[in-house]
């Protein structure tokens, strides 16, 4: 094969019929029959499928990878130069110790450390660089036990999201031979340090069961504490902030149910309130009361209620923070004397602090047009200090401790940019694009201050728009490599997210899904009409469900884009939603619809699904990235999509598929390896708009 000839996947006749409609899918053979085994053992992939993926990788490398190697390396070094390599987090106190993580210069993975709370010598509890070895290492975190004697840490070594939990004796530094193998990654200690509650996958890679591992016993003897019977619900395990309860939550994307276990004595799980379709709630505890954030009783943007611990059913829920339409309650933290809630109104977040003794409230907010805000309290319940993080597209991340008694803010850390960063050289703007139905779509912009808005600038427009996930207007050391080259960097806060409340999410899912695509296109047209860029100078980028967005806007308006970057793109929507053996399919039906049982859902999804809607038209340059062991967006989705684009599209623009043969949904595991993937994407964007370096 010459360098100018892209791979062509063979066509194998295959069809499926649903609701009386037959569809041809000649590239269905790219889905390995043993895909579950491949997730854990990539070497078992069918040789013919592997050969095709490697041919695509070879084509990408010959046509783009090698010719742009110098540019990619330059971008990689720029981004790496903005990262303080020997960086440290901010210590979180817990009893006699303060726990932290930090990075070493030149190393890919963190150290987990602790120091005596009142000062003293640091102890390295875990060095992930040693544990990682040479292969993939997906670190799921570490959690010390209540006695501070042991550390449980978890890692995935294939990218398939199967995590082994290892228990380390912190007095000797030696790991126990009793590994809790192939868990789903979430786990908590019992209060007596004698047991770990953890999640377990079913045969289709769905977290469906909670087991308890008693230290010193065999894993196959671990008792089942909770098992979910509905394949559409996933389960997780956590703990209340006051350490009183182990929390088991069962949920899909619109409905949840919580069970509590006494963290001191164990025992059987106790139900808070039975699941009710479209009702969501989460729970904290304090002084014989449960504090519950919920959308019950029509509280679309959520409210906070209380209920007696001994009688927690919804009939006993009493409003504490009533529902206010348009003010989305994103999160809450309950402390001994305070309730913190993170809210968003008109796309901007704020933190509200409520004194639970006086009922007085104070608001913590900032003045920039667009910014990101977060809150946490670490390990402790009886504390008068909470921690907030703040950044904006121009302002590096800042971490403060806030004294709840005085309101005083103490700056603990400002993100360092070793190569230098002057916020005054950049401008952050928030504009609104007018969607076809009149909705105002927020768009966050970052660009060099003083640029002429004459339509000549290239732009990169990023979008996601699903599952209610909102895209934060935060600082990124990576995007500066585009902005410094004259790009306007834009984030479209489209429907399907919750930037403007829960209704913004509802109007971008199921039958309203096309709004997501229309909003993104409207954002691009708003950039053009305001003089930030012009048609054919915009590179679109999105990943996962945002990758599905990329496929849809490629089909709908191929003329708008200079190029499209689709990372682990969910593009084979119809076939995936028709396959109830795949890990995410049943839990995703509330988000997209169930085409197995509903002819209406089938027709609607088929109309916009990127793979199904590929047509004989000229497409812009496309760069698709996949992970072989990805259990969320399986490798064959982008592989099939690229194969059909090659077979059907009429244009001559370049089309690349790059599959990471040793990683999953999150891409490369090391922090520097991830930067290399970012550099690949940005080199593609730079070349698409005709820049040389």
Image (spheres, helix red, strand yellow):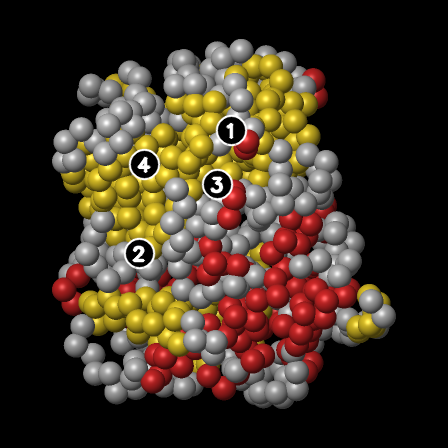
The image position of residue 428, as x and y in percent, is 24, 66
Q: Name the residue under label 4.
A: 340
Do the residues bearing badges 4 and 3 touch, measured as CB atoms within 8 Å? no
Quadrant occupied by the N terminus: bottom right
Q: Name the residue under label 3.
A: 294
Q: Name the residue under label 1.
A: 316
- Using a 10 Å C-alpha cutoff, classify the residue at mark 2 as few (fewer than 14 neighbours), some (14 to 19) or many (20 or more): many
In this rendered view, identify the residue nearer to me: 570 or 294. 294
- Using a 10 Å C-alpha cutoff, classify the residue at mark 4 as few (fewer than 14 neighbours), some (14 to 19) or many (20 or more): many
Q: Is disc 2 placed on a helix, strand or loop?
A: strand
Observer-side mark, 4 or 3, equals 3
Observer-side mark, 1 or 4, equals 1
Q: How far apart are marks 1 and 3 (CA)?
A: 14 Å
Do the residues bearing badges 2 and 3 touch, measured as CB atoms within 8 Å? no
Q: Is disc 1 placed on a helix, strand or loop?
A: helix
Q: Name the residue under label 2.
A: 348
Q: Which residue is drawn at 19% across and 21% down?
A: 119
User: Is 334 placed left or right of 132 in the picture?
Assistant: left
Do the residues bearing badges 4 and 2 touch, measured as CB atoms within 8 Å? no
The image position of residue 103, as x and y in percent, is 32, 40
Q: How far apart are marks 2 and 3 (CA)?
A: 21 Å
């Amino acid at each position: 094969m010459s360098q100018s000839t892209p791979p062509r996947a063979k066509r194998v006749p295959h069809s499926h019929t649903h609701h009386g409609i037959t569809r041809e899918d000649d590239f269905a053979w790219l889905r390995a029959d043993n895909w579950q085994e491949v997730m854990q053992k990539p070497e078992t992939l069918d040789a013919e499928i592997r050969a095709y993926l490697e041919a695509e990788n070879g084509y990408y490398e010959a046509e783009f990878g090698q010719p742009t190697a110098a540019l990619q390396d330059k971008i990689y070094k720029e981004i790496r130069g903005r990262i303080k390599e020997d960086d440290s987090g901010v210590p979180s106190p817990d009893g006699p110790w303060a726990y932290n993580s930090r990075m070493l210069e030149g190393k890919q993975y963190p150290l987990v450390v602790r120091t005596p709370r009142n000062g003293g010598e640091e102890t390295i509890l875990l060095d992930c660089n040693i544990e990682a070895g040479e292969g993939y290492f997906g670190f799921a975190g570490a959690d010390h036990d209540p006695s501070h004697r042991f550390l449980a840490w978890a890692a995935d070594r294939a990218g398939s999201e199967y995590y082994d939990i290892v228990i380390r004796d912190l007095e000797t530094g030696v790991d126990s031979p009793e590994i809790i193998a192939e868990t789903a990654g979430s786990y908590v200690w019992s209060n007596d340090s004698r047991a770990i509650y953890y999640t377990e996958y079913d045969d289709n890679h769905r977290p469906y069961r909670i087991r308890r591992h008693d230290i010193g016993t065999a894993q196959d003897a671990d008792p089942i504490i909770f098992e979910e019977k509905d394949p559409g619900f996933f389960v997780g395990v956590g703990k209340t902030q006051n350490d009183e309860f182990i929390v088991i939550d069962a949920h899909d994307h619109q409905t949840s149910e919580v069970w509590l276990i006494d963290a001191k004595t164990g025992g059987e799980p106790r139900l808070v309130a039975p699941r009710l379709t479209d009702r969501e709630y989460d729970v904290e505890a304090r002084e014989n009361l449960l504090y519950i954030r919920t959308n019950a009783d029509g509280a679309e943007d959520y409210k906070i209620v209380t209920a007696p611990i001994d009688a927690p059913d919804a009939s006993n829920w009493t409003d504490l923070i009533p529902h206010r339409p348009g003010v989305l309650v994103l999160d809450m933290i309950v402390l001994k004397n305070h309730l913190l809630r993170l809210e968003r109104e008109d796309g901007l977040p704020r933190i509200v602090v409520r004194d639970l003794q006086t009922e007085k409230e104070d608001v913590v907010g900032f003045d920039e047009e667009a910014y990101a805000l977060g809150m946490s309290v670490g390990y402790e319940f009886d504390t008068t200090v909470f921690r907030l993080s703040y950044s904006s597209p121009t302002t590096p991340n800042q971490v403060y401790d806030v004294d709840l008694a005085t309101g005083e803010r103490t700056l603990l850390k400002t993100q360092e940019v070793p190569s230098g960063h002057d916020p005054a050289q950049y401008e952050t703007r928030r504009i609104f694009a007018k969607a076809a139905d009149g909705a105002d779509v927020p768009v966050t912009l970052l660009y060099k201050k003083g640029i002429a808005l004459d339509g000549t600038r290239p732009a990169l427009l990023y979008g996601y728009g699903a599952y209610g996930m909102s895209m934060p207007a935060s600082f990124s050391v990576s995007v500066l490599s585009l902005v410094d080259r004259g790009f306007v960097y834009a984030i479209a806060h489209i429907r399907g997210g919750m930037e403007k409340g829960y209704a913004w999410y509802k109007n971008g899912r199921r039958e309203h899904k096309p709004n997501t695509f229309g909003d993104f296109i409207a954002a691009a047209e708003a950039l053009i009409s305001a003089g930030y860029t012009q048609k054919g100078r915009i590179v679109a980028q999105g990943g996962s469900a945002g990758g599905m967005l990329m496929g849809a806007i490629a089909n709908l308006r191929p003329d708008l884009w200079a190029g499209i970057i689709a990372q682990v793109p969910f593009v084979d929507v119809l076939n995936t939603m028709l396959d109830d053996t795949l890990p995410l399919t049943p839990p995703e039906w509330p988000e997209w619809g169930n085409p197995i049982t509903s002819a209406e859902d089938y027709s609607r999804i088929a109309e916009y699904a990127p793979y199904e809607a590929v047509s004989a038209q000229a497409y812009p340059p496309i760069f698709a990235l996949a992970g072989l062991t990805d259990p969320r967006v399986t490798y064959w989705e982008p592989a099939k999509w690229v194969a059909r684009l090659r077979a059907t599209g009429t244009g001559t623009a370049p089309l690349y598929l790059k599959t990471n043969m040793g990683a999953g949904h999150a891409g490369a595991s090391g922090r520097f390896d991830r930067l290399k993937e970012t550099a690949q994407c940005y080199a593609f964007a730079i070349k698409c708009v005709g820049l040389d370096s």
